[in-house]
Image (cartoon, grey):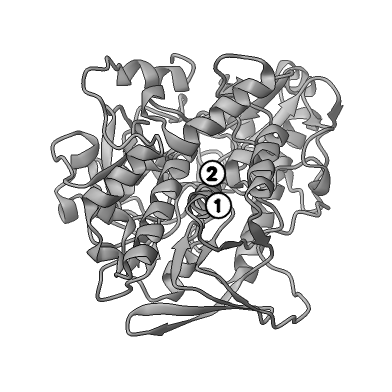
Amino acid sequence: MWDSVYYYREKTQRKLHLKQDVLVYGATPAGITAAITLKKQGYNVRIAECSRFIGGMTASGLGATDLGAEEALGGLAKQFYEEVAKHYGLKKCVRFEPHVAEGIFKKWLADFAIDVQTEQFIESVVKENKAIRQVRMTDGTTYEAQQFIDASYEGDLMANAKVSYIVGREANAVYKEIYNGVQFGTQHHKFERFIDPYIVEGEPESGLLYGISDEPATEQNGAGDQRIQAYNFRVCLTKKNKVPFPKPESYNREHYALLLRYLQAGHWDAMKLHTPLMNGKTDLNNYGAFSTDFIGKNYAFPDGSYSLREKIFQQHVTYVAGLLYFLVNDEAVPADVRQEVQQWGLPADEFLETNHWPRQLYIREARRMIGEYCITEHNALQYRVCEQPVAVASFHMDSHHCRRVVLNGRVVNEGDIQIPVKPFAIDLRALLPKQQECTNLIVPVCLSASHIAYGSIRMEPVFMMLGQVAGTIAAQALHMHKPVQQLAYEDIKQSLLEQGHVVEWDMSIVDDPIRRMEETFGGE
């Protein structure tokens, strides 16, 4: 129904051989800032992107920026938001329409004459003496470079280069954390009513409602597993110049039976986190126990084949679009809820190529590298100070739910955790693989961090800043003809400062992390 194929479709074999100083994999905000940083320093750089689009989540509906502390912004990330404000004629602005973000990124790429090759799916990586020499794509295109940056949300270049990584949640015991692993009993995004999980209430033999796992909830809090936090789409909505929510071809109203039961129990909050943008548009994100997060349906995504990822992607489209269609059209939905949702539709002037649906699945977490240094909650809570700071994260540690199960006869979600943090530094070495595994790869998105620490780092402004760091590291490695792990930290730091980058947090700045976290959820 949607022409939104993102991950994979067969392409004509073209067998091009492209040579550049640096190959950036992923036209995400991190990939774009990395490429610009390198181009500014005179290096030949090219971006290879698996989708047909550029800009990642920033240009695909995530217009309500998960900013954290404004003073942590620097370099190209700060410039991006300055250009957003300029577009709207404002002094400051961190909320924007998707096409505005895309326009800024496209202009940047054009201004610096950066070539972006789209629909590039990695088939293999050739390494010599622990260094990547060539990347081959499924359409036969090969890329030869001296330095490589994996700026993808999935970490595909990293994985194909045989760099160590993890998928899922570490047990608390691994890094001596307390907020990692299994998390039952959260007070956030929980069911606010006792909801029976069975198709026929009170009758377990009737089976479970759709979306509830039948696995026993027997783990202790803090246990490790391979589950990942839920994905969704950040859906741009509007009340004017709108397109009605379409009915997905594979729509199944039974997928929303649990939500209907929750509504009939008197609780309605699925669209509460509906942040105003500009020109009457909004950014709809998951809120509450049953909303746009497709809980438990993404486990196979990080290590999945491209065809499997495409299937999971389309399942998420069907689920989220079907949710909106259900709320508008199903007569069993309370009339006041239907009337509220009926006011909204997809914006007719956004995402024209994909029938107004966001192009990028919100991959909140996929692979995470096991690198030279691992950022953990000890960094985020400032129990440990990194020795080679290159950027600042400041959003609260944020994990969405990882599964939905039955516990004590009721349905519960598990995995959501929200912990306020003060701004903290990200160590240079967290972007670098272990030297014995790869000497010319930098990973600014799927960097080395524990699951819970990554929950703070994984925000688009931070990715923009880490992309600039990655470009700076690659430039230094080219200049010095050294492995990325052997570069002088002070040289990288000095270069970043000269670029207007924020390397460390100014402790004289007054910051209230609890207030910032409350504002994210509307002051709840």
Residue under numbered circle 2: 198
Label 2 residue SS: strand
Residue under numbered circle 1: 207
Label 1 residue SS: strand
Give 259 or 199, whichever is nearer the viewer.
259
Q: CA distance from mark 1 to mark 2?
A: 6 Å
Q: Amino acid at mark 2?
A: Tyr
The mark nearer the N terminus, 1 or 2, is 2
Q: Is residue 193 above or below residue 497?
A: above
Q: Is any part of residue 80 visible from this angle?
A: yes
Give 133 or 120, whichever is nearer the viewer.
133
CA neighbours of label 1 inside 10 A, class few (<14), some (14 to 19), many (20+): some
The answer to the question of whether label 1 and label 2 lie on touching residues, with beta carbons closer than 8 A, is yes
Name the quadrant of the C terminus. Answer: top left
CA neighbours of label 2 inside 10 A, class few (<14), some (14 to 19), many (20+): many
What's the residue at 36%, 39% (across, down)? 498
Q: Position of residue 155 (x, y in %)?
A: 46, 62
Q: Is residue 311 above or below residue 220?
A: below
What's the residue at 37%, 31% (across, down)? 395
